[in-house]
Amino acid sequence: MAIKVFADGANLEGMLDMYENGNVQGFTTNPSLMKKGGVTDYRAFAKEVLAHITDVSVSFEVFADDVETMEVEAREIATWAENVYVKIPCVTTKGESTAELVRKLSADGIKVNVTTIFTPTQVDEMVEAVDAETPSIISLFAGRIADTGGDPIPFMTESVKKAAAKPNCEVLWASTRELINIYQAEACGCQIITVPNSILAKRKNIGRDPYEVSLDTVRGFCQGYRGARFPYPAVARTPTVPWAVRPGLSFPHRSRAPRGSR
C-alpha cells in the first residue's frame, strides 16, 4: 500500500518494537497518551525516543492552551530533532483559531502537524496557513466524525483535493476505528493514517478466508464458555384443554338446521 501507517505512542518499548520491525512509517504522540503511559518528564521522554528513532517522523504536541505559550513550546520542540513535527491543535479550548500561529511557524521552516480538524472551514484555513515549501501534516479526525453518525469519506476526499494546492502538505486520517479504514483512507487519497496497536495487530487477518474466520470465531466462543453450567429449568406442561371448556373463552357455534330440513 502507498499510504504511510503511523502509530500513536507513549511507551518507548512499544514504539521501538514497531520501529525495529518495520511495522510503521512514523509516530504521533499527545499529552493524554503520555499521561496514561506514566510519562512524567516530557522533554526527557521525547529525547530518548528521538535518540533511537531518527529516520521517520515523530509528532510531539504542545501542552499550552493559549497561542502565545503554544508558540514558545512549539519552537523548543522543533529543536529536538530534524524528524520532529510539532502538533498544534487547530483551535484552543476557547475556540480561538491557531491559523496565524501555524502560518508563522510554517513560514519559519518548522514542520507542523495541525490536529483536531473536523470541518471544511478548518481545512481551508489550515491549508491556506501552511507554507508551500515547508513539510506539514493536517490531521482530520475521520473516526470521530463517523462516531456522530456522519460519513467521513466525502469530507476526507474533498480535503485531499484542497491540500493538493500545497504539495508538501499531507493529509492524515486520524481516530482510526477499524482495519478497513486503512483501505478507505488510501482510496480517499490520504497520505498517512494513524492506527492504534489493537488494529495493527489485526493486519494478520488481511486476505483470510471468511469461512476460516467463522470457524475460528465459533471455536473462540466455545472455548470462552467451556465449563460453564447452564441450568435447564423443569418445563411445566399445560394440559390441552378443549376450546369449549377453557375458562373465559367462548367459541361461537353456528346453529345448524335439523338434518333433512335442507
Image (cartoon, rainbow, N blue to C red):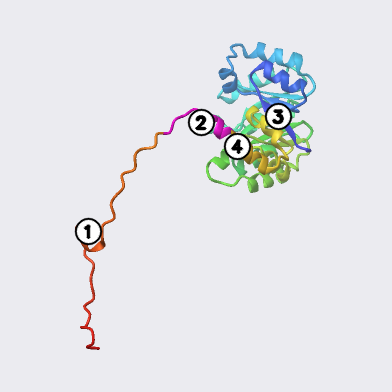
Is the Cβ of the residue at disc 4 closer than 8 Å to that at disc 1?
no
The three-letter amino acid code for the residue at tag 4 is Thr
Separation of marks 2 and 4 at Cα, in angstroms: 13 Å
N-terminal of the two: label 3 or label 1? 3
For image coordinates 58% across by 14% down, the residue present is: 38
Q: Which residue is mark 2?
A: 225
Is 20 on the left or on the right of 141, as rendered? right
Separation of marks 4 and 3 at Cα, in angstroms: 29 Å
Is 96 on the left or on the right of 134, as rendered? left
The three-letter amino acid code for the residue at tag 3 is Phe
Q: Secondary structure at mark 1?
A: loop
Q: Which residues are magenta?
A: 220-230
Is the Cβ of the residue at disc 3 closer than 8 Å to that at disc 1?
no
Give the image quarter of residue 208. top right
Tag in front: 3 or 1: 1
Q: Which residue is mark 1?
A: 246
**Label 3 environment density (alpha carbons within 10 Å; few <14, some 14–19, many ≥20):** many
- In the image shown, does 134 or 205 lie closer to the viewer? 205
Tag in front: 2 or 1: 1
Q: Which residue is mark 4?
A: 217
Q: Position of residue 214 (x, y in %)?
A: 62, 41
Give the image quarter of residue 125. top right
N-terminal of the two: label 4 or label 1? 4
Q: Position of residue 173 (x, y in %)?
A: 66, 37
Query: What label does residue 6 carry, if any?
Result: 3
Q: Secondary structure at mark 4?
A: helix
The three-letter amino acid code for the residue at tag 2 is Tyr
**Label 4 environment density (alpha carbons within 10 Å; few <14, some 14–19, many ≥20):** few
Q: Secondary structure at mark 2?
A: helix
